[in-house]
Image (tube, grey):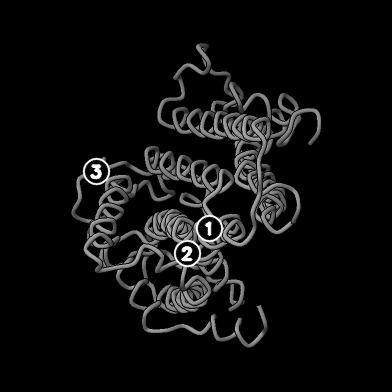
Amino acid sequence: MDLSFLIHALIPSWNSVSLLAGFFTYLAIVGSILPGKLVPGVLLSDSTRLHYRCNGLLSLFLLVGLLWISAKMEFVSLTAIADRGLELLSTTFILSFLVALVLYFSGCKSKSKGSSLKPHITGNLIHDWWFGIQLNPQFMSIDLKFFFVRAGMMGWLLINLSVLAKSIQDGTLSKSMILFQLFCALYILDYFVHEEYMTSTWDIIAERLGFMLVFGDLVWIPFTFSIQGWWLLKNKVELTTAAVVANCFVFLIGYMVFRGANKQKHDFKKNPKAPIWGKPPKVIGGKLLASGYWGVARHCNYLGDLLLALSFSLPCGISSPVPYFYPIYLLILLIWRERRDEARCAEKYRDIWLEYRKLVPWRILPYVY
């Protein structure tokens, strides 16, 4: 791929703009009208709560169904995304940049005193634009933070499915591609089955919405998490039966730790007396869960996330580092995030956090880190 071709491929077109506009319009409409469980968010500092309509799974099934029918009627091409990958990447990046600017300027003008919309301005333009000013900005009653996460996860699956269609069209479908697609699809579907768990994550309850989260949701998740699929389109990998079994084992262990840890945390926040692994939970200072996975490592959910990321890349073999960009990046990100979490928790919980650290000395991987 020469430089001139790359530059030309990255230039946005009206087709890419239309695809994105249609996608976001669809999500905005069906997210507001389709039935779904109304989940209360965590209690904010001003004693208010946001409520989230968790209908992402139904929205996803409906979207995939509509696209399939449209493809059968030759209204759309299933390979449209795969054919315009770089173009959509640059268009989405520009959109994220502009959205972050709008969030910055609208946040600066906000006079709200509520926890969700109260502006937090440091005076450093770059810092405020990057990390955001408001906790839960909205547009036409749509919570943008929750909306962007949903868009990123659905976008990831749509990219993968388009790459799969391209692979079938080109006659290059392999066991590696099937395994990668299967693991990602299961992970994404599981996310939407348990979408309400997202309402108690750090990003939703504590991070303000700026370029960091907007770019992460709309660009980073769908376009970097799908790198393995793009790579497999151009590279053939033959997997042995043993390799397939080992890859499945890594995925299952990662899923068990990731989903189990997040479920325990979510259940604990809803009911601090709910049993963990069949026993009453051990709680430090009445606030910190020290049972189950959270009694094994302080950020054990990150270990599950890392194993899942590795399972997405293993189908590509070990001939190139390119498919391992995601797990390597995620390792760096989660260590950085874990350090940020530790600092915040130490400041928030003080002596309770010190006691928890003594009881659970391992950060992510027991006996290693």
Is the residue 87 above or below the residue 54 in the image? below
Image quarter in which the N terminus is found: bottom right
Looking at the image, which residue is at 63% across and 44% down?
315
Is the residue 257 above or below the residue 123 in the image? above
Counting residues from the N terminus, which is met first, the one under dot 2 or under dot 3? 3
The reply, left or right, for residue 37 in relation to residue 189 is left
In the rendered structure, are the residues bearing label 1 and label 2 in contact, judged by CB atoms less than 8 Å apart?
yes
Q: Provide the residue designation for mark 1.
A: 221
In the rendered structure, are the residues bearing label 2 and label 3 in contact, judged by CB atoms less than 8 Å apart?
no
Q: Amino acid at mark 3?
A: Gly
Q: Which mark is residue 36?
A: 3
- Measured as percent of width and height from the top left, residue 216 is found at 54, 62
- Measured as percent of width and height from the top left, residue 42 is found at 41, 42
- Measured as percent of width and height from the top left, residue 207 is found at 52, 56
Q: Amino acid at mark 1?
A: Ile
The reply, left or right, for residue 274 in relation to residue 21 is right
Towards the viewer: 32 or 70 = 70
Q: Is residue 291 visible?
A: yes
Towards the viewer: 328 or 119 = 328
Q: Quadrant of residue 329?
A: bottom right
Q: Which mark is residue 218?
A: 2
Q: Amino acid at mark 2?
A: Leu
